[in-house]
Amino acid sequence: MTPRTLCRIMLSAVLCLTLTACGEKPDKAKAEKTNAEATAKAAADRAREDEAAKVGVDAVVYGLPLVIAELTKRVQTNVAAPEPNAHAPVNQFGSMVKYPTAADKDIVRMNVDTLYSFAFLDLTAEPIILSVPDTRGRYYLSHSSTRGPTCSPRRASEPRARRRAISPSPALAGRAPSPRG
């Protein structure tokens, strides 16, 4: 055998071994790396899904009451003048003349032993002045969707008539200016 032939045989053997090694399965380190990457991707996908679910729950918890309030406003203010069922146009009070029944669904879970008066106020142009007559020792409850329910603090000690400015700005809310006459 000539050196040239021997070289060809050795080269052929190396080539065969190299090609055979290409068909082998990846080594354990490569498999572990691929598995770790897949696990990390699955964990990241799970975290994104959990975050999306949390955002969805928050949207319902905080958004649904606003939607219900807007729908209630549309139902109750879609009239030309105040009606005895407490429906009235924006910036006007509507008062009930009889107790609501359990079948009344304008407002969710309305008390059936309470007479209500409602007003949806538009404060975009200016504050609204609310004049409250002498309550003769009784109290009233006013509710603002921006500040929450507030009860008249002077119900027993000062039942006298008073005026109050209702404004979205805390600087403008409170005691109303004296009436001009």
Image: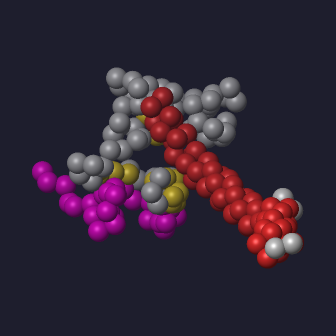
88 in magenta: no
Q: Decide: is 144 above or below 82.
A: below
The one of 7 and 112 positioned closer to us in this rendering:
7
Residue drawn where x is 33% and y is 51% of the image: 130
Please state the horizontal and vertical placement of residue 48, each as a whole percent of the image.
Answer: 66, 59
Q: Nearer the viewer, residue 171 or 117?
A: 171
Q: Quadrant of residue 79?
A: top left
Which image quarter is the N terminus in?
Answer: bottom right
Residue 160 inside the magenta-drawn segment: yes
From the viewer's perspective, is 160 left or right of 3?
Answer: left
Residue 124 shown left or right of residue 140 in the figure? left
| Front-most of residues 148 and 29 | 29
Q: Position of residue 39 (x, y in %)?
A: 78, 65
Q: Main secondary structure of the magenta part?
A: loop
142 on left or right of 50: left
Residue at the farthest top position:
80
Question: In the displayed structure, would residue 24 be above or below residue 82?
Answer: below
- The structure's colour scheme is secondary structure
Residue 37 appearing in the image: yes
Instruction: Specify whether 12 is left or right of 78.
Output: right
Count of picture labels? 0
Q: Which segment is the magenta one?
A: 152-181
Q: Residue furthest front?
A: 2
Q: Which residue is painted at 58% across and 51% down in the image?
A: 59
Q: Residue at x 41, y 41 (%)?
A: 119
Residue 19 is situated, as x and y percent measured from the top left of the image, at 80, 61
Which residue occupies 27% across, 49% down? 124
What is the x, y in percent for residue 125? 23, 48
Q: Nearer the viewer, residue 112 or 53?
A: 53
| Residue 95 visible (yes or no) | no
Reply above or below: 162 against 18.
above
